[in-house]
Amino acid sequence: MIRSLFVRGLLAGIIAGLAAGAFAFFAGEPHIDAAIALEEAAAGHTHAEAPLVSRSGQVGGLFLATALYGMAVGGLFGLAFALVRGRVGPRSGSALAVGLAAAGFVAVVLVPFVKYPANPPAVGDPETIGSRTSLYLVAVAIGLLAAAAAAVAHRIFEVNGEPVRWLATGLGFLLPVAAAWIFLPAVSEVPEGFPADLLWDFRVSSLGTQVVLWGVLGVSYAYLLYRSERVAGVAVPA
Amino acid sequence: MSQLSAPHVQPIPLRSLAWWALAVPALLLLAYLVTFDQGAISQAGDYLHELMHDGRHLLGVPCH
C-alpha cells in the first residue's frame, strides 16, 4: 500500500522533472546564456583552461538535474500523500494529490522565492554562498512548518464551523510566513548595471520551471493513482 | 466543503509509515546532490556541480 504510493511518487516525479526540464530548456536557457555572456564580457575573456563541463554538457545536465530533483521530490510527495490521506484534505485521491502538490509548491518554492528569488549566473557573491544557502534552507523549513501548522489548525478547528476553521488555517500558514519574510535578513547582490529585464525574465522562467514541476507532479500522481485504483476494482470517488 | 473532508478514508497507521520514514534521508541526499553540492563539502561534487549547473539555477536554489 505504502510502497505503491511511494513508487507512484517516484514515477510521477521523474515525469514532472522531465517536463520541467523541457520548459526550462525553452524558457530559461536563453537567459542563462545571456547572463554568462555578460559574465564573460565583464571578466574580459580570461577563461584560459577548458571548463570541467562544456556549455552543451551543462544543457544536457539540465534534464538530468530536473529529473533527479523531480524523483526526489516525487518520492517525498508520495510519502507525504500516504501520511495525510484520511487525516486532512479532500477525500478524493485526485483532489488530494493536486491539492498536496499545490501546498508543496507554495511551502517549498514560493515561500523561499518571495524572500530569496532565483538568480542567473553573474548575480551573487561567491563569498556569501554559505550564508545564502543557509538562509534559503531556513526559508524552506519555515514554509514547510507553516504548511504543517495550517494542516494541524485545519484539523483542530473542524468542530468550530467552516469560517473559523478556514480563518485558523489561513492564519496558521500566513503568520509564520509573513514574520519570516519581514525578519529574515535581506540578500541584495545584483551587480551594478545588471540588466533589470534579464534578471526579471530569468526569475519568471525559474518560477515557471517549478510551477511546471509541481503541477505535472500533482496531476500525473492523481492519474497514476486513479488508474491503479480502477484496475484494482476499488470504487473511486471522482 | 464538509463533504469534501475525509472521514471515510482510513488513514494509514503511523506505525507502518515509520519504516518508510527511513527513505526520507535518502531522498533528501539525492535532492542535496542535485541542488547544493558545491564541491565544498564533497570534492566529487565538483563534476556534478558543473554538470547540473543550469538546472540548479533554474530550479531557483542559490548558486555561486
Image (cartoon, coloured by chain):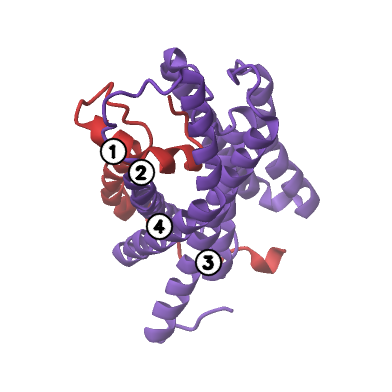
Residue type beneath disc 3: Val
- At x 43%, y 53%, the residue is A77
Q: Amino acid at mark 1?
A: Val
Q: Nearer the viewer, mark 1 or mark 4?
A: 1
Subunit bearing disc 2: A
Q: Nearer the viewer, mark 3 or mark 4?
A: 3
Residue A219 — which label? 3
Q: Is any atom of residue B46 visible in this view? A: yes
Cα distance, mark 1 to mark 4? 34 Å
Location of mark 1 (residue): A53
- Mark 4, other Cα within 10 Å: few <14 / some 14–19 / many ≥20: many
Do the residues indicated by labels 1 and 4 lie within the same chain of the protein?
Answer: yes
A232 is higher (above) or lower (below) than A58: below
Q: Are marks 1 and 3 in contact (CB under 8 Å)?
A: no
Q: Say yes or no: labels 3 and 2 on the same chain.
A: yes
Q: Earlier in the sequence, mark 4 or mark 2?
A: 2
To which residue does mark 2 refer? Answer: A58
Above or below residue A66? Residue A2 is below
**Marked residue chain, label 3:** A
Residue with the mark numbered 4: A78
Q: Earlier in the sequence, mark 3 or mark 2?
A: 2
Residue B38 position, x and y percent, is: 32, 27
Dot 3 or dot 4, earlier in sequence: 4
Residue A210 place in picture, x, y as percent: 53, 49
Q: Which residue shows up at 63% across the image and 63% down it?
A: B5
Q: What is the distance, in whole Å, between disc 4 and disc 2 at their CAs? A: 29 Å
Mark 1 or 3: the one toward you: 1
Q: Colour of chain B?
A: red
User: Which chain letter matches label 1?
Assistant: A
